[in-house]
Amino acid sequence: MTELLNTREYKKEQLKRLLLKIHGGESVETLKEEFRQVLSGISPLEIPLIEQELVKEGISAKDIAKMCDLHVELFREAVKGTDELEEKNLPDGHPLKTLYQENKEIMKDAEMLNLYARTLATTKDGRMREEILGVLEEIVNDLRKVGFTHYNREEMLTFPYIERRGLTAIATVLWTKHDEIRFMIRYLAGLLRKRDEMPWEEFAERFKNKASEASFALSDMVFRENNIYYPTLRALLSEGEWMAIRMQEEEIGFYKVDPPAWDPDDGVRPLHPWEINPELSVEELLNLPKEVQEALKGQPLEFDRAQLKRDGDIDLGTGYVSVEELKAIFEALPVDVTFIDRDDRVRFFSPGERIFDRTLSVLGRPVQLCHPPKSVHIVNKILKAFKEGRKEEATFWLRLGEKYVYIRYLPLFDENGEYIGTLEMTMDIEPYKRIEGEKRLLDWRD
């Protein structure tokens, strides 16, 4: 019996039996213990091979996909050695719990990518190939979103907090790995698009190998995050810091999860990176994962103590600048900006780019008197529509010698929704119309 239990054929038949139950309508949850017993006797390396054989024998890959939650669970138990969930005691909607939940989805999709790619490489039937390719395109398109959501939130919202505390190396390593994974997934998407440009066998083999690399990289990142990075965040970040992160998450988006709203206890206010005390206490250092403690040994931490707001700075809501800096910013912008207040009088124009003449004598002047009499009625119609909330913009474009002038009017409102004026933006878009291809940051040469 022991020999039988150790054969792949027996394991495969046990999985097939359970998968047929799923296909018949039974839920994974009710079969969970049976799955656990069968899967516990299978090494993680065997699972894709057995699944591949099952697909060949007609078991639906979608039914197999329903096992992926258990794969993730087994993976976690293997690397942690316990049943304890990393997100234990974290409330729903907490940013860290959301990251853990997304990693479950990433693990599932990484496994499915590997499974379908291996199955594709051994499939001879043309119709089946096309079906598998369609599923692979869907998986790869999904995985591309990992970089735009999960990784982007970590880089933009959590990295600043650990960088402030001097842990810049952790952020640098993770970001480098994120970009490697982004490239791998982008490469797979390109390979799928170009599959007809090479012999089938070459494409299938290349895709299988690259998909395997990407799947491993994604799983490895889940391991790094769940076991090193997230415990680091949990040891260091306060409720106020998590609250500030939660307030900004919606701007970036999530990977296959929809977290509810979350607010910590009353009295907690959001804390942004520049507001925190960057120094680490002995207790905080001792609470860090042992891998992080080892990496920090003998390396003095350089805390970022820079103060964001200086005396005399203007609070713009999304940052602080001096009047001198603000003038320089407007002067450098490749756009001519004019602000008209709620009484239709010109209050400000930017000092840099000039499309139409502007002189200081225009300040305080009714905007209607700044236009030729024949067009004043149109100006009034635009302003009336803005004030009544009927229009959100008015755009125009015209040729002016060698320039191709683009003009955009936007109504402005205060936090209560009351109209406070109109912004006019004018720019020469001719140079931008000639741009082709790409020129990336890494292409820059001094």
Image: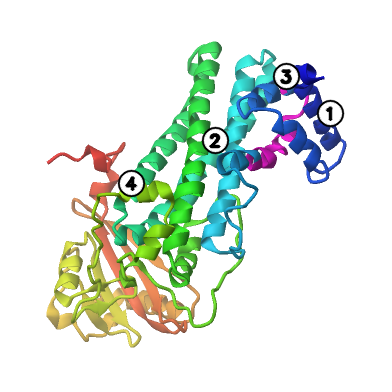
Which sits in the foreground, 40 or 2? 2
Residue 425, x across and y down, in percent: 29, 66
Residue shown at 39% from the left, 53% from the top: 155
Magenta segment? 55-73
Mark 2 falls on what kind of element?
helix
Residue under label 3: 8
Labels 2 and 1: the sequence-earlier one: 1
Q: Main secondary structure of the magenta part?
A: helix
Labels 3 and 1: the sequence-earlier one: 3
Q: Is residue 333 above or below residue 265?
A: above
Labels 4 and 2: the sequence-earlier one: 2
Residue under label 4: 295
Residue under label 1: 17
Tag in front: 3 or 2: 3
Mark 3 falls on what kind of element?
helix
Residue shown at 51% from the left, 32% from the top: 216
Q: Which circle marks residue 140 in the picture?
A: 2
